[in-house]
Amino acid sequence: MKKILTIQDISCYGQCSITVALPILSSYGIETAILPSAILSTHTCGFKDFTVLDLTSEMPKIINHWINEGIKFDAIYTGYIGDVRQFDYVLECKDKLLVDGGLFIVDPAMADNGKLYPALNNDIVEGMKKICSQADYIIPNITEACLLTDTLYQDKQDKTFINNLLHKLIECGYKNIILTGIISDDKIGAIYYDGTNETYVLKELQPTSYHGTGDIFSSVIVANILNNVDIKTNLDDATDFIVDCIKNTTNDKDHFYGVKFEEILKKRMNQ
Ligand code: PXL
């Protein structure tokens, strides 16, 4: 069984980051461990007055304990990082806690729809650039890809804009890019690009978007990479999952903060 370490925050309520990554990774047969970057009462989009307990000072203690125990992982997968001091700890994990040939996968979860998430600033962007440049795979949305390449975000994203963005990401030295949130006519999807090969999937565009779908998408992508699933099947699986989760949530107006992914996960596990 493959073993993964995921480094991101615990948003106690709101269905994102660690609370979605763990059930998804487990359901794909992967053993999980966590290095929580912070504990928040909720995520930071759509809730006011959320609480934050920063865990930066705990990180080196946890990492050192694992080093002393000889603990290693087949992959490290990072998401939302709320404090700029944590990027060096992330890289320390990559250097000291991965098995030989282990994968370092970064979802630079920091922005959407042309804007940084409310609690973040430009130092986080610089930190994300640093860890993305060392990653085996990165999974940015279009806003994050713009930030990683110092590209001005555009609301209208035609094929030329997307192609330029993909080329810029490669020029900046990022490898194996999975760019999400590509909208084309009435379709939405994702593209994989490694500088030579391009694979993309497009599915029916949904009328509503939800917070946390990026974390769900990345968790599926990461699980499939670890399970050696080919990239086309992987992109199909992750986008189908998100479309089903959104369809399962749109009729529930009280559920504004994230998608109801659990019933979809259950159905898939019974298939
Ligand atoms: O889904 C990304 C995410 C994760 N964690 C926290 C967030 C966000 C996005 O806003 O606020 C705390």
Image (cartoon, rainbow, N blue to C red):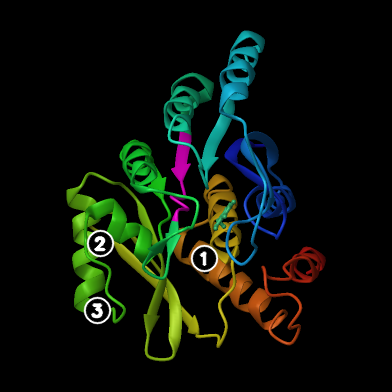
Of the numbered discs 1 and 3, the one sitting upstream in the chain is 3
- Which secondary structure, mark 1? helix
- Please provide percent x and percent y for residue 139: 43, 55
Q: Residue at x 70, y 60 (%)?
A: 14
Label 1 to label 3: alpha-carbon separation: 23 Å
Q: Amino acid at mark 2?
A: Leu
Label 1 to label 2: alpha-carbon separation: 21 Å
| Residue 159: image tag | 3
Circle 3 packing at 10 Å, graded few (<14), some (14-19), many (20+), is few
Circle 2 packing at 10 Å, graded few (<14), some (14-19), many (20+), is many
Q: Residue at x 61, y 30 (%)?
A: 55
Q: Is residue 90 left or right of residue 200?
A: right
Residue at the disc numbered 2: 166
Above or below residue 271? Residue 2 is above
Q: Quadrant of the C terminus?
A: bottom right
Q: Residue at x 63, y 56 (%)?
A: 43
Q: Is residue 195 left or right of residue 70?
A: left
| Residue 233: image tag | 1
Q: Is residue 166 left or right of residue 28?
A: left
Give, as a single range, the part of the protein colored magenta: 103-110
- Please provide percent x and percent y for residue 86: 48, 31
Above or below residue 109? Residue 70 is above
- Which secondary structure, mark 2? helix
The answer, for residue 112, to whether it is visible in the render is yes
- Please provide percent x and percent y for residue 229: 53, 55
Of the numbered discs 3 and 2, the one sitting upstream in the chain is 3
Circle 1 packing at 10 Å, graded few (<14), some (14-19), many (20+), is few
